Amino acid sequence: MTSARVNTFYRKFECLGGACPASCCKGWNVPVDDETWRYYKSLPGILGTRLRLSQMTRPEPVFALGYKDCEYHDRDGLCRLQKELGIKGIPEVCRRYPRLFENMGEYTAGWLDLSCIHAATLFLSETERMGFTEEIGDAPEVRPSGNNEDGDFLACLEQVREGMIRLLEDAIEKGSMESAGKALLFIPRFSYAAQNACIRGDYGLLLRPMEELAQELPAYEGEAEGYLPCAFSFVDGLFHCFYNSALKKQSPHLYALCQFYLAEYGGQAAEKNEKKHEGLIRAYMEEVPDALAHYLRYIEYSLCQYCFSIYEDYSFTRWMLRGIVDGSLILELMALSRKKEGRDLTSLEKAHVIAVAERRARHNPGTFKRMGKAGQDYFYGECGKEY
């Protein structure tokens, strides 16, 4: 075991087990680590044979669940393997989930993946800014996440992350969509400038206070006009990357929301859809307590996660947009769900929207890539294709 920096609600997580309303034992490809696979190969009897036959190797062993429950997911909602074999009988990813860790060389960071409905519920209950503000001593040993050993660059990224979070927290305090829009449009503007600075080998921009840059940094050629999250053309592009008829089996609830989206906006003029969409989002933001704070803190949470991806590939224009991309689609689904049901959603219902959306947007490689590209195309157009 080792120490790790974690976010504020990390310690509060406890698996709901059989009481979970959206089990993680369905709809995933579950990789089997080397140690667990060796254990499976050593098991005698029918159970050992079944475990070995149930694996697909591509190139590593994996439980390919498709849209079905794991065959070892019992009716009581618990894992038969864990009940019969103990904790060593389940893959490492099942033991850790939804806890994720990155070993950055300088330190290890840990957080909860919001594709878990209970983690999403804890996120919605959090009233403090996001960030790695606490330390635990019982984190698992994890391999370094990459080959980058540039500690100075990592320190710069941490300063960028904290500066961005300050701007978003300021927008939360002001409480208006206009202030939020200004903060959100600054993120792609800064990302584009930071990308070019890194290509030149100049980290000076990363060290400047975000509050100053937000006032001084000029727009780039082709910068998106208008403010988020009221750009229907942006959300519609994300939706068509996200939606697939296979959702009917994977998540009937999410599929029903997508069908409602198509009924709301399908076959209508773009100008009419822009006005309808803006009215939907404004009503949701103005009438639902904490809606704006949840949206912006989701983006903060993403900045905390994907900061480490920038450390590996230096792609600001790819990773800093990810929270806006996924968060804007989730916001749309939340607002549509409220309109469809004709009432405010409970915290658990909101968490369910976040969790099932994240499972597709972030854990389906094809969807993840398409949505990321749609975000880059919207903000950067031709000027961002080189990144």
Image (cartoon, grey):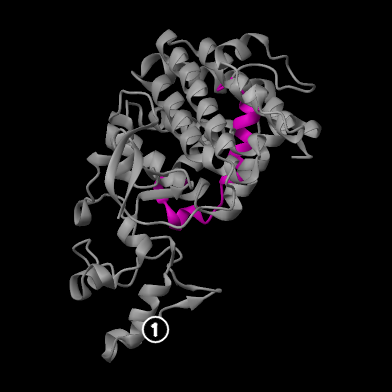
Judge by depth and name the residue closer to the eye, 341 or 297. Answer: 297
Q: Is residue 67 above or below residue 336?
A: below
Asked if the magenta segment contains residue 252, the reply would be yes
The residue to which callout 1 is attached is: 52
How packed is label 1: few (under 14 Cα within 10 Å), some, or many (20 or more)?
A: some
- 261 displayed left or right of 294: right
Q: Is residue 253 above or below residue 231?
A: below
Residue at the image point whose x is 42% and y is 31% from the top: 334
Q: Give the amino acid at mark 1.
A: Arg
- 83 displayed left or right of 189: left
Q: Is residue 230 visible?
A: no
Q: Quadrant of residue 324?
A: top right
Asked if the magenta segment contains residue 247, the reply would be yes
Range of residues picked out in magenta: 228-255
Location of residue 350 in the rendering, given as x and y in whole percent from the top left corner: 35, 34
Location of residue 121 in the rendering, given as x and y in whole percent from the top left corner: 29, 37
For the stretch drawn in magenta, the main secondary structure is helix
Location of residue 287 in the rendering, given as x and y in whole percent from the top left corner: 37, 15
Quarter of the image that includes the C terminus: top right
Location of residue 290 in the rendering, given as x and y in whole percent from the top left corner: 35, 20
Judge by depth and name the residue closer to the eye, 386 or 69. Answer: 386
Q: Quadrant of residue 48?
A: bottom left
Q: Is residue 151 visible?
A: yes
Q: Kindly state the secondary structure of the residue where label 1 is placed.
A: helix
